[in-house]
Amino acid sequence: MSGSPVKRQRMESALDQLKQFTTVVADTGDFNAIDEYKPQDATTNPSLILAAAQMPAYQELVEEAVAYGKRLGGSQEEQITNVIDKLFVLFGAEILKKIPGRVSTEVDARLSFDKDAMVARARRLIQLYKEAGISKDRVLIKLSSTWEGIQAGKELEEQHGIRCNMTLLFSFAQAVACAEAGVTLISPFVGRILDWHVANTDKKSYEPLEDPGVKSVTKIYNYYKKFGYKTIVMGASFRNTGQIKALAGCDFLTISPQLLGELLRDTSKLAPALSAKAAQASALEKLHLDEKSFRWLHNEDRMAVEKLSDGIRRFAADAVKLERMLTERMFGAENGK
């Protein structure tokens, strides 16, 4: 029995409903987990690649990257850097076989305060993608949303035609600066904002629409739509499906396989919470931020200052773990270990 159209509609998953008004992105390095959810795009970060690189299923990619690094030669440090760049691109290339859209590949977080180094590393990653037969149009380069990162994004977009995804974005100041820089996409975090409020205030739980992370992304979305910025708003870092549903209608949302699975099994009715039309009615006023005013406004937001610093440290720590893992693999035997 096919059932009535009304019943079929009622049984539609929350994920399928969400896809009608938001572009769904998979947040994972485990590309075997992507197929089931049919996302448009995918995002990776150093922590996700570290986790995937330790899975048995992906050891061939690790071996290929190691062989590449050895072939290029140079100092031990240079070889490891080349292996990691190649590994990120190999994972990205495999992900692109499974999605119609773009993959986000992140620049080393330890470069977060060095604009020129971020630009150089981004161009290197794009060159590696090109060598793998992948157009730069299918790649977003992820950069930390420091002042230097945002300016690197501006330069990459304007001078090199390289599209950027600005990550670790927690403050309104960061969002305004990214809009003014004309980057392709921003990833304002939701869950990590909630984490901070739970850890640092007396309130330990929030209804989705009152969630501080949801409210932050809603404000940014409304600002971008009210003032006609073309930069895509992609909510990221979710702790539960309630946060995702409260941001339905946002341009893009990047979601872990676990939460994609929950949305696929959820058949409750979903309606857009955000819209460009509603954004026009918001009371937000347009800002212009130079470096001094950006640093001041961002510094006024204790949560954002702490979470940006913490996020950079965490990604940097996972980059170091990945380096150690690869160093052991490449040079462990010859070091007598």
Image (cartoon, helix red, strand yellow):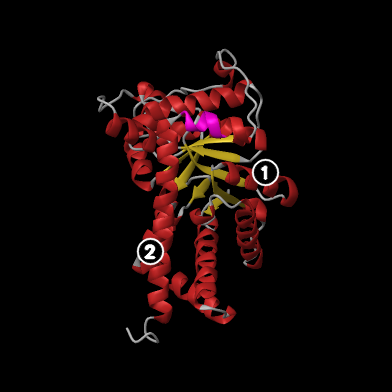
Q: Position of residue 84 (x, y in %)?
A: 50, 66
Residue 207 visible from this viewpoint = yes
Residue 251 in view, yes or no = no
* Foreground residue among 195 and 214: 195
The label number, if any, that marks residue 321 in the structure image: 2
Q: Which residue is mark 1?
A: 154
Location of residue 105 with respect to 337 vertically, above or below: above
In the rendered image, which quarter contains the N terminus? Answer: top left
Report the magenta stretch's main SS.
helix
Q: Which residue type carries mark 1?
A: Lys
Using residue 201 as the reference point, say whether residue 175 is left or right of it.
right
Which x, y percent locates residue 326?
A: 42, 72
Is mark 2 in CB contact (under 8 Å) with mark 1?
no
Q: In the rendered structure, which segment of residues is drawn in magenta?
A: 295-300
Q: Residue at x 73, y 45 (%)?
A: 158
Q: Who's the residue at 44% across and 31% down the image?
A: 17
Q: Which of the pair 94/75 is nearer the observer?
A: 75
